[in-house]
Amino acid sequence: MEIRDYELSPQSLIRLLVVFSFWLTLNAATVAAASADDLPALCAPTPHLQREAGCPDLGPSAYMREAAAAGLVFPLPALEVTATLPYRGLTPHAYGRVITDTAPVYRHPLEALAGLPPARRFERGFVFVSLLGSVTVDGQTFYRINPGEYMRAEDVREARPSSFAGQFFTAPPAGKVGWLINTVQVSATPGAPPAPDAPFVGRYQYVTPLNVQRVGEWDWYEIGPGQWVEQRNLALVAPTHPAGTPPDVIAVDTYEQSLGVYRGGNLIFATLASSGSRWFPTRPGTFKVWAKFTYGRMTGVYRDDRSDYYFLEDVPWILYYDGDRALHGAYWHDNFGVRTSHGCVNLSPRDARWLFNFANIGDTVVVFSSR
């Protein structure tokens, strides 16, 4: 491949390298298949604009010509970006769900307004991005999702992470503790249908059951005097560590969809969790925390038709314990106490932040089912 020898300023060289790298990514297959003799000469951007003869419409040359034709002048103007604050201060960043299929990402809002091709597009799927700030240009609002990356605000819907938080204990509770995972009417006796005027108990209400009684296939718990709820509406945590586990342990119960932190065998913290769905179950076993990250990107796809593709930017407070499975915060759902994930253990942002700060590399994590 021949690149014509012209003198470039450092700024022009940097722009050339960035755009040329992007062009190589898009044309990797073509470049790999062609021989060096088959490839046309490429011109640096500035010489292309000055003398187009012999310069093909490829790579940075084509980009610069299109930009010039659209009336853009380089360097593009600096932007006054207004920071997007995290919802209720729950997470390191504000986040948004990409609601437009194959939504485009631009290097600068003016490129979008000029009709230039985007730097990249997101794949269709379950896609969330960080919202670092917003800027309005010519009446259109854009989000900055990464340094040098912008999306139209109409392609993104701001996310509102869950504010749910677990429970701390200075002394071990006398019995099981837990939360309602559904809003239900209470029954006057175990197994009986609720009366029409029976009170409701709300989802995420914290309870300390008074009694338990088996009726048919399910346990019924008395969560208040004469107020009984069937176990499938509850997620519970035991006051002492699971049998056969170390006394200092982070215990994830995939049946209850709950998490307990034990020290000296006693419960010091309990909360709801969301482990892997039935299609992507969380693996049981005893593990060690092997890595901690304040936040990181998680993306993947398992099905051949890619219908389960997901892309999650800046997942917060990650504790890796089983290969690529981790305990981490989840800002994209408020479904704690229910199996939801692709195999990780999801926690609310508040709980994930506390656990991240509390746990150390080497701590024991036990994943089990109390059923």
Image (spheres, helix red, strand yellow):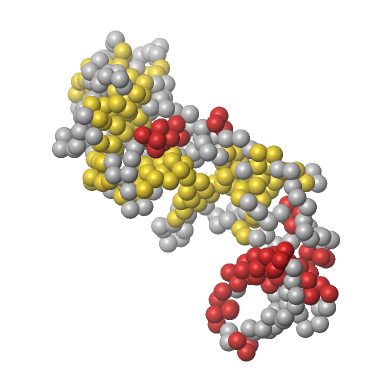
Task: Determine the image quadrant of residue 225.
Answer: top left
**Residue ID at (65%, 68%):** 17
Image quarter of the C terminus = top left
Image quarter of the N terminus = bottom right
The image shows residue 40, relative to residue 90, as above or below, that is below
Question: Which residue is situated farthest in the left direction here?
Answer: 244
Question: Which residue is situated farthest in the top direction here?
Answer: 225
Q: Position of residue 142 (x, y in %)?
A: 70, 46
**Residue ID at (54%, 80%):** 32
> In the drawing, does residue 10 fall left or right of residue 92?
right
Q: Position of residue 217 (x, y in %)?
A: 21, 30
The image shows residue 247, relative to residue 19, as above or below, that is above
- Residue 126 visible? The answer is no
Task: Determine the image quadrant of residue 7.
Answer: bottom right
Q: Position of residue 119 (x, y in %)?
A: 65, 60
- Residue 224 visible? The answer is yes
The image shows residue 115, relative to residue 57, as above or below, that is above
**Residue ID at (51%, 36%):** 91
Which one is nearer the viewer's eye here, 82 or 201?
Answer: 82
Total labels drawn: 0
**Residue ID at (54%, 46%):** 128
> In the drawing, does residue 116 fall left or right of residue 148?
right
The image shows residue 110, relative to residue 286, as above or below, that is below
> In the drawing, does residue 266 fall left or right of residue 178?
left
Q: Position of residue 165 (x, y in %)?
A: 42, 27
